[in-house]
Image (tube, rainbow, N blue to C red):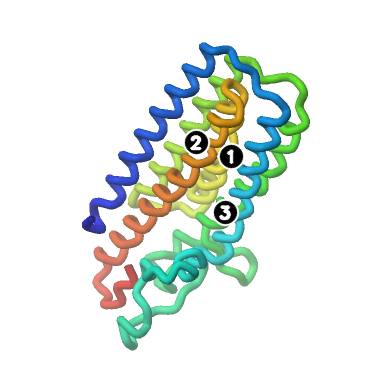
């Protein structure tokens, strides 16, 4: 598949996954099944494990790629010679990527990864009261959670695609995306039990991959529009 077609392919798959999740939600709602504490514990455990994986990737975004022996999306110094750049905040140390970073004290942080960290930590805190809750969520409230989750994911996709990047907005979009995943997981588990909830967890991996593909596409556009020769993407 050509690199320029990958974002379109991932967005298409994400849309299909969203439609499928909505269909499962509506069918589960009609069946009037009620989630049990075992369902909540199982799904919450899978979601918490996913949050831990997310946190590890915010520290070292490419550790899974390296572990699998796959090539990096960025070009190495060996490929570019003296024109290769170093990295600050997970981005090339180029002024074109300054709005992709946040400066906290003397540290440069990737605004996207920092947002994912905030979202993952917030979601871990929010999932605790859900696990220990006794009553199942009402149907209308579950629907509101589902809609809110889809809105958060869509916002993250849109923000990752726009040309003008604002660090604070990127942070917020990524944080809300992870909280949106939790919203979708809770909604699906509440109306259908463990299987729909685990389906939402699985689709979260696809959606975060889509967000990454959109960011990589935007990074490549930044490099292609820059007159300098150090094309890191």
Question: Which of the 4 image quarters holds residue 77?
Answer: bottom left
Residue 152's disc is 2
For the N terminus, which image quadrant? bottom left
User: In the rendered structure, are the residues bearing label 2 and label 1 in contact, judged by CB atoms less than 8 Å apart?
Assistant: yes
Q: Position of residue 121 (x, y in %)?
A: 67, 48
Q: Which type of secondary structure does the marked residue at label 3 adopt?
A: helix
Q: Farthest left residue? A: 2
User: In the rendered structure, are the residues bearing label 1 and label 3 in contact, judged by CB atoms less than 8 Å apart?
Assistant: no
Is residue 221 positioned above or below 182 on the image? below
Q: Residue at x 28, y 45 (%)?
A: 8
Instruction: Count how many numbered circles sit on residues in the image.
Output: 3
Label 2 vs 1, first from the N-terminus: 2
Q: Which type of secondary structure does the marked residue at label 2 adopt?
A: helix
Question: Which of the 4 image quarters holds residue 93?
Answer: bottom left
Of residues 43 and 22, the one nearer the viewer is 43
Q: Nearer the viewer, mark 1 or mark 3?
A: 3
Question: Which of the 4 image quarters holds residue 206?
Answer: top left
Residue named by callout 3: 54
Is residue 138 positioned above or below 10 on the image? above
Classed neighbour count for the residue bearing mark 2: other residues with Cα under 10 Å, few (<14), some (14–19), many (≥20)? many
Residue named by callout 1: 179
Separation of residues labelled 1 and 3 (CA atoms): 12 Å
Label 1 vs 3, first from the N-terminus: 3
Separation of residues labelled 2 and 1 (CA atoms): 8 Å
Q: Residue at x 48, y 46 (%)?
A: 205
Q: Position of residue 43 (x, y in %)?
A: 63, 37
Classed neighbour count for the residue bearing mark 1: other residues with Cα under 10 Å, few (<14), some (14–19), many (≥20)? many
Classed neighbour count for the residue bearing mark 3: other residues with Cα under 10 Å, few (<14), some (14–19), many (≥20)? many
Label 3 vs 2, first from the N-terminus: 3
Q: Residue at x 34, y 72 (%)?
A: 232
Q: Which type of secondary structure does the marked residue at label 1 adopt?
A: helix
């Amino acid at each position: 598949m050509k690199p320029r077609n990958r974002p379109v392919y991932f967005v298409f798959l994400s849309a299909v996954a969203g439609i499928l999740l909505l269909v499962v939600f509506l069918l589960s709602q009609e069946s009037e099944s009620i989630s049990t504490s075992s369902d909540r514990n199982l799904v919450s455990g899978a979601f918490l494990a996913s949050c831990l994986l997310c946190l590890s990737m915010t520290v070292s975004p490419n550790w899974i790629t390296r572990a699998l022996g796959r090539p990096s999306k960025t070009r190495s110094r060996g490929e570019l010679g003296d024109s290769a750049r170093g990295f600050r905040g997970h981005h090339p140390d180029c002024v074109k990527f300054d709005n992709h970073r946040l400066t906290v004290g003397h540290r440069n942080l990737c605004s996207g990864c920092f947002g994912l960290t905030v979202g993952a930590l917030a979601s871990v805190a929010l999932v605790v009261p859900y696990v220990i809750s006794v009553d199942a969520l009402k149907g209308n409230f579950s629907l509101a959670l589902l809609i809110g989750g889809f809105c958060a994911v869509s916002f993250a996709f849109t923000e990752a695609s726009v040309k003008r990047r604002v660090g604070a907005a990127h942070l917020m979009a990524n944080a809300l995306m992870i909280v949106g995943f939790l919203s979708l997981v809770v909604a699906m588990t509440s109306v259908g039990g463990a299987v729909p909830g685990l389906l939402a967890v699985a689709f979260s991996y696809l959606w975060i991959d889509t967000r990454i593909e959109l960011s990589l596409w935007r990074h490549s556009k930044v490099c292609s529009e820059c007159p300098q020769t150090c094309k890191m993407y």
